[in-house]
Image (cartoon, rainbow, N blue to C red):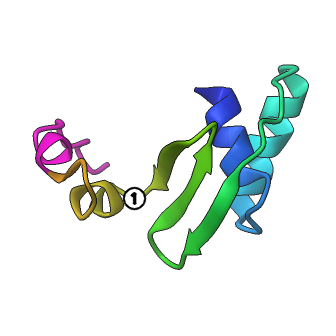
């Protein structure tokens, strides 16, 4: 999972992306090639790795995409 996140986050300029990239490098994760990369402002990231579509970001991004029904069943994290 770290390598998939790394593939997308390596193309992002978001501060959290930089932290994920640093962590992935420290763990020795491989940098997989991401294609069709999209940064969706305020939502997250989308791209393809080895032909598989990846989405990484806010819950709302998942709930509006092809995994909407599945994502709506995920437990919600309580706000602190």
At x 48%, y 76%, the residue is 42
Residue 14: give x, y in percent of width and height.
Answer: 70, 67
Establish if 72 lies above or below 32.
Answer: below
Asked whether 77 falls inside the magenta stretch, the response is yes
At x 24%, y 47%, the residue is 67
Quadrant (top left, top right, bottom left, bottom right) of the N terminus: top right
| Residue 59 in the figure: left or right of residue 23 | left
At x 76%, y 47%, the residue is 19
> 17 or 63: which is nearer to us?
63
Mark 1 crowd level (few <14, some 14–19, many ≥20, 10 Å Cα): few
Span highlighted in magenta in the image: 69-80
| Residue 10 in the figure: left or right of residue 35 | right
Asked whether 25 falls inside the magenta stretch, the response is no
At x 69%, y 55%, the residue is 35
Residue 53: give x, y in percent of width and height.
Answer: 48, 47
Establish if 22 lies above or below 10.
Answer: above
Establish if 40 lies above or below 45.
Answer: below
Establish if 23 lies above or below 41.
Answer: above
The kind of secondary structure element at disc 1 is loop
Residue 69: give x, y in percent of width and height.
Answer: 11, 47
Q: Which residue is mark 1?
A: 58
| Secondary structure mostly taken by the magenta-highlighted segment of the chain | loop
| Residue 80 in the figure: left or right of residue 6 | left
> 26 or 54: which is nearer to us?
54
Quadrant assignment, res 49: top right
> 74 or 64: which is nearer to us?
64
Residue 45: give x, y in percent of width and height.
Answer: 55, 61
Q: Residue furthest top?
A: 28
């Amino acid at each position: 999972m770290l390598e998939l996140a790394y593939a997308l986050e390596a193309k992002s300029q978001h501060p959290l992306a930089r932290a994920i990239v640093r962590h992935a490098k420290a763990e020795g994760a491989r940098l997989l090639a991401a294609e069709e990369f999209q940064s969706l402002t305020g939502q997250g990231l989308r791209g393809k790795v080895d032909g598989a579509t990846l989405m990484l970001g806010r819950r709302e991004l998942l709930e509006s995409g092809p995994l909407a029904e599945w994502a709506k069943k995920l437990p919600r994290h309580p706000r602190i």
